[in-house]
Image (tube, grey):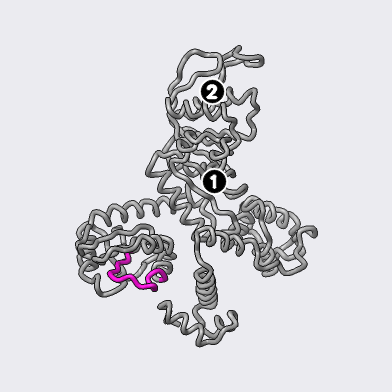
């Protein structure tokens, strides 16, 4: 089946470029369409004049498709505008100021993105890809692309319980290696035996070494080595690891023989290694070796829309092959408003505790929630998620006026989406007039009711 690509012209000044690109794609068996034909397709947005409403168009389109944005304006775009387009949801931005159509630039990206989307639908990924939040899916898409189309070392950062080990397993699956994933948890290494865990040892190398044993470097040869919580490694072990990475060889403890090893290195940590480097507790040269590509797993508070899909997923696993019960509205509200310091792992354990109290047919009810975990008052607002969002904006240097405008725009957009674009219901929820909703929609090119 030919690859189908949605093409949208943001203004008439780019009509000639759009027509040329349309014909160029047909010549290489790529079928242009005038609307997204399915969720998670691929799209191209072409514009000649930048208008403030363009970021809203990109934001909406990027919810449906992987979006390539092409600017055919002869006037150079300021860097802050280019970054704003990427932040709005564009996957890449091409500049064609001469008005020519550069087919190869486009087709290379379209074919790569199509291949990535095919992998995203594979069983190797679907078992991990639970949730529809934009942050999670974009992170997973980036992981898939790096895992399948490069051999770069991967550094996974994130809070406890955010699924760093699942990402490491997926990198191994998509790397194409037949051998099992070699896992070493750096928090469990004792100072006396840490060297043996990495390098292995010869028989008689130390007291208790009754047989020759391979270490992680030998086991991971021609495969993937996953070092969990690498931030816990001592400085001497960091130096030894760096040498093996650089020289691709090692010696067992008690041996004078060098053994070759080649492996893809995947590391995970809940520490900020850049701060550790600044403090001198983590080697800078090792950090830059392992951080060939960095991936941050978002905490659950940044993907709250995934809480209920994850809860249903965990119920399905607990029920095994049996039908699993639904959640009544009060339980759904409880799960959505509860805090999860342990992130997804915390949610999974919460669902399990509720599941084990449930009995009989019918949905899970609030009585199934353990008494010491029940909420007897409305959760505080503003909550931690709101505070984190404001802190992030301040860290980026966003002024107060823009923060307020972004909050207002987001409230309008989310409410209209939840109310199926009904102006009256949205106005009632927002406690504003119908006219205020209409004016916002007109200003943001959202005129369809």
Give the side of residue 131 with respect to residue 104, left or right: right
Where does the N terminus fall, quadrant-wise?
A: bottom left
Give the side of residue 35 with respect to residue 236, left or right: left
Is residue 164 visible in the rendered image? The answer is: yes
Residue 407 pos. (x, y %): 54, 71
The reply to whether the magenta stretch includes residue 55 is yes
- Element carrying mark 1: strand
Name which residue lies at 39% across and 65% down.
38
Q: Which residue is mark 1?
A: 157
Name which residue lies at 34% across and 60% down.
68
User: The magenta stretch spans which residues?
Assistant: 44-56
Q: Which residue is mark 2?
A: 199
Name which residue lies at 55% across and 17% down.
253
Distance between the alpha carbons at the discs numbered 2 and 1: 25 Å
Residue 26 pos. (x, y %): 22, 61
Residue 190 pos. (x, y %): 65, 27
Q: Residue furthest right?
A: 371
Pair 2/1: label in front: 1
- Element carrying mark 2: helix
């Amino acid at each position: 089946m030919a690859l189908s690509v949605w093409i949208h012209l943001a203004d008439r000044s780019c009509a000639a470029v759009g027509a040329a690109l349309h014909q160029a794609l047909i010549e290489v068996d790529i079928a242009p369409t005038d609307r997204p034909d399915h969720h998670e397709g691929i799209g191209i947005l072409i514009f000649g004049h930048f208008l403030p409403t363009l970021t809203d168009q990109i934001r909406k389109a990027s919810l449906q498709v992987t979006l390539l944005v092409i600017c055919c304006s002869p006037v150079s775009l300021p860097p802050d505008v280019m970054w704003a387009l990427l932040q709005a949801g564009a996957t890449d931005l091409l500049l064609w100021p001469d008005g020519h159509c550069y087919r190869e630039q486009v087709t290379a990206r379209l074919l790569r993105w199509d291949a990535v989307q095919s992998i995203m639908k594979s069983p190797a990924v679907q078992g991990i890809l639970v949730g529809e939040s934009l942050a999670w899916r974009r992170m997973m898409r980036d992981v898939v692309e790096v895992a399948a189309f490069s051999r770069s070392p991967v550094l996974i950062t994130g809070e406890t319980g955010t699924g760093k080990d699942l990402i490491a397993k997926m990198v191994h699956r998509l790397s194409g290696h037949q051998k099992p994933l070699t896992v070493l948890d750096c928090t469990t290494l004792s100072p006396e035996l840490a060297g043996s865990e990495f390098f292995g040892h010869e028989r008689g190398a130390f007291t208790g070494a009754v047989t020759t044993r391979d270490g992680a470097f030998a086991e991971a040869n021609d495969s993937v080595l996953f070092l969990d919580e690498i931030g816990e490694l001592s400085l001497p072990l960091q130096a030894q690891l760096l040498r093996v990475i650089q020289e691709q060889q090692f010696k067992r403890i008690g041996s004078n023989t060098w053994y070759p090893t080649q492996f893809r290195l995947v590391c995970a940590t809940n520490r900020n290694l850049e701060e550790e480097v600044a403090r001198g507790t983590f080697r800078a040269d090792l950090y830059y070796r392992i951080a060939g590509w960095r991936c941050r797993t978002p905490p659950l508070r940044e993907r709250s829309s995934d809480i209920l899909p994850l809860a249903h997923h965990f119920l399905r696993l607990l029920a095994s092959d049996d039908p699993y019960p639904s959640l009544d509205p009060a339980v759904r509200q409880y799960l959505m408003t509860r805090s999860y310091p342990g992130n997804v792992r915390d949610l999974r354990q919460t669902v399990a505790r509720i599941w084990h109290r449930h009995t009989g047919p019918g949905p899970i009810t609030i009585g199934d929630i353990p008494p010491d975990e029940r909420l007897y008052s409305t959760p505080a607002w503003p909550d931690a998620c709101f505070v984190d969002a404001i802190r992030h904006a301040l860290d980026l240097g966003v002024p107060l006026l823009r923060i307020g405008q972004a909050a207002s725009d987001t409230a309008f957009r989310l409410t209209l989406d939840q109310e199926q674009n009904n102006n009256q219901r949205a106005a009632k929820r927002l406690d504003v007039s119908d006219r205020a909703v209409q004016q916002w929609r007109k200003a943001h090119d959202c005129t369809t009711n």
